[in-house]
Amino acid sequence: MSLNPIRPWRNIERRTSRQIMVGKVPVGGDAPISVQTMTNTDTSDVKATLDQVLRAAEVGADIVRVSTPDEASTRALKEICRESPVPIVADIHFHYRRAIEAAEAGAACLRINPGNIGDERRVKEVIRAAKDHGCSIRIGVNAGSLEKHLLEKYGEPCPDAMVESALEHIRILEDNDFRDYKVSVKASDVFLAAAAYQGLAEATDAPIHLGITEAGGMIAGTVKSAIGLGNLLWMGIGDTIRVSLSADPVEEVKVGFEILKSLGLRTRGVQIISCPSCARQGFDVIKTVEILEKRLDHIKTPMSLSIIGCVVNGPGEALMTDIGFTGGGAGAGMVYMAGKQSHKLSNEQMVDEIVRLVEERAARLEAEAQAAEAAAQ
Ligand code: SF4
């Protein structure tokens, strides 16, 4: 990410990590921080799983993980991987055969801890399958399932135990000459996760997969993830993220993107700046924003839109957004384009007109980008 010389207080210097590929998606190095989610369907139900993968990809998921606990799931994985528009990570616990089957089925990455899959022969077989099929591996340490010898050594899950666990798994891969791995050290406790990730960031140059595990439901989990992941990302730690919510995977992707957008690390779609509204509002701000969020959901081109109830903050916010609307008196307000007053608009026409302006701008920016790309070829 290039540093901003005008507003240095916005700069985030990302930790230097080496880059690996998860299918076609680069993770680490200077690659954009990717957003992941995980399906919660029965993986052997190809249609339901693919449908969820597609919905997640539609809202911006770069990578999707699916659980492969049995042979029926690894069999289904073949079609899922073939049809998915994004790379698929196969989630495996303990069963080394499932890992080999998943690699053969076309998984872009295996989430597996090599220390937990048995003897050296099995480990070598899995690594060989990953190499043969171009799979990367994610080592996923979790505070809730730390190895017995580490719990005995440390007494309880703690940052040092989690980092040590990660390093033990890393060593197995490195000893087998396998370097296409990324690592996570997740915990549901934000303090524990944040400390473990900081330790991990010091201990390795591998790309880091961030997550606060079992974060909770929509609101509590979003807040917890924003605090945990937000702090780490702000420190420059993290190359790919997954927000874990007891909610639709689509919501996880949306929350992940919002965290990255808030820190200026990714852009996607319309970022709406809106006021909480009060007695001064010239129109129903809350209802309008709700409608606009739905009607602008399909826009992928990054742009900002301010929807502000009155002139107290409206013109100021409009100065910093691409398109703005500020409520005024007598059932009408002012449209701003690139910070400048453009035209008056009645409250009734406002939603349709704002949607039209946003779509028009998105189409123009897309056409310009395509023309620039064509010229560069
Ligand atoms: S911008 Fe105006 S309407 Fe919105 S919260 Fe502030 S004072 Fe109230």
Image (spheres, rainbow, N blue to C red):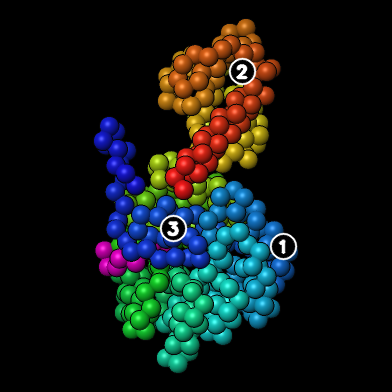
Q: Is residue 48 shown left or right of residue 313?
A: right
Q: Which residue is mark 3?
A: 240
Q: Badge 1: how crowded within 10 Å, few (<14), some, or many (20+)?
A: some
Q: Position of residue 185 (x, y in %)?
A: 40, 66
Spatial CA span between label 2 and label 3:
40 Å
Amino acid tagged 1: Ala
**SS under mark 2:** loop
Q: Residues within 10 Å of mark 2 (few under 14, many from 20)?
A: many
Residue lying at 64% horizontally and 26% vertically, measured from the top left: 356
Write down the residue under mark 1: 48
Name the foreground residue: 200 vs 80. 80
At 43% from the left and 53% from the top, the residue drawn is 33
Does residue 120 show up?
yes
Q: What is the count of numbered marks?
A: 3
Q: CA distance from mark 1 to mark 2?
A: 41 Å
Residue 111 is left or right of residue 39, and the answer is left
The disc labelled 3 sits on which kind of residue? Thr
